[in-house]
Amino acid sequence: MSGSGVDDRRIIDIDVVSRAVIRHNPWWIYQRMVEEKFSENPEGVLRYLPSYGDRRSGFLVSVRRYLLEYYSSYDKSIGELARTRWRLHRIWYPNLFYVLRDDILKNVSPPAILTLRGPRQVGKTTLVKLLIIELLSLRLLKYVEDVDFRTTHYRRIFYFPCDILMGEREELLRVLMDFIDRASRISDKGPIMIFLDEVSSLRGWQEVIKVLYDDGSLNNVILLTTGSHSLDIKKSSEVLAGRRGNIEKSKLGSDSVLLPMKFIEYVKLLSEKFKKTIYNRRRKWFELDNRINILLNLAEGKIDIKLREFEYYLSDLRSLLDDYMVTGGIVRAVREYDEKQFISDVVYKDYADLVVRDAESWRLNERNLRKTLYAILLTKGSPVSARTLAKKVGLTHQTIENYLEYLEGSYAIFQPYRLDLNRKMSEYRKARKIYFVDPFIMHALNAWVYGYSVAFDESVENLRKYKPFITECLVASHLARLAFTALRSPMHLVENTVFYWRQDSSEVDFIFRLGKEYIPVEVGLSKKASKTLLRLSRILGKKGILTGYYDRIRVDERIVQVPIEILLLLA
């Protein structure tokens, strides 16, 4: 019998963690066999060979598919994708996947420390696994094609879910030191690649990375951490100041955000017809710069010919938008609704429970969180102050501010302020609007606040009752995300990119900033623009955009009327 019960538990914990390390890195065991088989007969291994004009791109897609199918038996996240009706034929590859791939495999050099944040259940773990599959795929691709990406040995790639450590940051230090020591013995020119998932579940994880950085352990490491709250990024910036490594050439900088799929991504994922309409070999209409130019031209009254093409498909797009208002861009909800035309309670509950659990880790109170969300839901997008919200639920205005900061930091809500036209700045002393980042996030938190017995049925009913508010949320969120992507501004600083405007008792829903331009937008149910929108368009020197359920794009003297489906595709 051991002399110390604590020591016994410690040995057991180490054994549990060691088994988890092996379980979460199956390529350490199986990739050697894959590579040997592939090197002997590459085309014989690949069952899926698309006929792309670009041979290298075709092979890369084929190798990805092969490895996804192979590792679906050994990796939980990939296996969950394979067991759905979609299987591995429909996977959401967000644009961020390609940018992150370029950053870690081309743009940054070791040592480099990057973070990836986003809402709970948005798909951060899946994105990381897709990046690892890409690393393995590019290594295989070298057998048949030249590869202009950095590659590395499969045993120098490490994935670790930090939430299994139950808050023990010292254990994280031991795990990382052990892996880096083993990986450094493998002869390969590529960097050591480390992916730490949900690292924010470990309070003080930044100090672990600081220790490793300062002692030189990360000199040949590219490290990507994921988490679910922007407050953790703030802490990282303070503790890791001057220790982010060689990230000057990164397209994203040190911190990136994965948000739920936007409407255009939703359309592309669910409709092969629209995927071919939006994309073609000669020109990628989806590219950011192109969409920004189309929007800027719209504000001048110039209509891109591609937009006329979408007018023919408005009926189909409207049906997809109705579904998107139910599922939002959360992949789990999208997939289940596509399969069953229903979303089970557990999908709503899992998201809400994680938000509550995260709040408690920041020492916030579940009851006060519920009260704050209740007050937000009552406003339905109307301008409101923290004091007004506080009065509705019997809390202090400072308490409300604290909970709003948490919800904004967890990417559940965002808060546009009124625009001061003279200074082109938010008027922080005035009331703000509060919108939800994604429809499903709103539905899930609404169900948690009200305690719905069947969340899906209540969400569909609420969609009928509160469609104008949900539509406003969608437009606000898409404009904010377009603006913050264009300006590379953090989402929690949305008040620098999207505003509302009020004069006397009249209001324009939004003004969004693209570069130096400020474009007014009104979400209308009527066919006519308000006098306030007309007045504001004259002041800003831009045609106001009036969006709603219209049948075509129309240009008037001061207004451009745009069907909401087309505006969301652009944003």
Image (cartoon, rainbow, N blue to C red):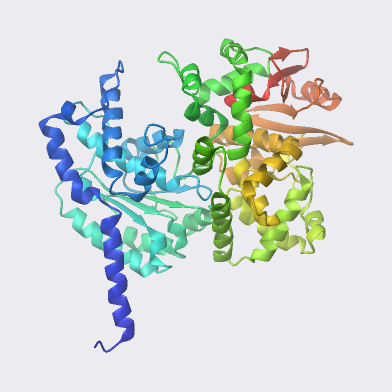
Front residue of 542 and 390:
390
- Report the side of 349 relative to 378 (left or right): left
Q: Position of residue 442 (x, y in %)?
A: 65, 46
Q: Within the image, what quadrant is residue 437 found in?
A: top right
- In the image, residue 556 sits, relative to residue 79, either above or below, namely above
Q: Nearer the viewer, residue 408 or 517?
A: 408
Residue 14, position in %: x, y? 29, 70
* Vertical side of 554 occupied by 91: above or below: below
Does 478 appear above or below 72? above
Reply above or below: 338 against 403: above
Of all residues, the one furthest to the left in this rendering is: 40
Whether residue 216 is visible: no
Q: Which image quadrant: the N terminus?
A: bottom left
The C terminus, quarter of image: top right
In the rendered image, residue 484, in percent from the top left (x then y), is placed at 57, 36
Q: Position of residue 34 (x, y in %)?
A: 17, 40
Q: Nearer the viewer, residue 88 or 56?
A: 88
Q: Nearer the viewer, residue 526 or 343?
A: 343
* Residue at image location 50% in from the left, 23% down from the top: 286
Number of numbered tags placed on the structure image: 0
Look at the image and tell me whether residue 454 can be seen.
yes
- Name the outermost residue toward the front: 340
Q: Residue at x 24, y 29 (%)?
A: 147
Q: Which image quadrant for residue 491?
A: top right
| Residue pictured at 58% horizontal, 25% vertical | 569
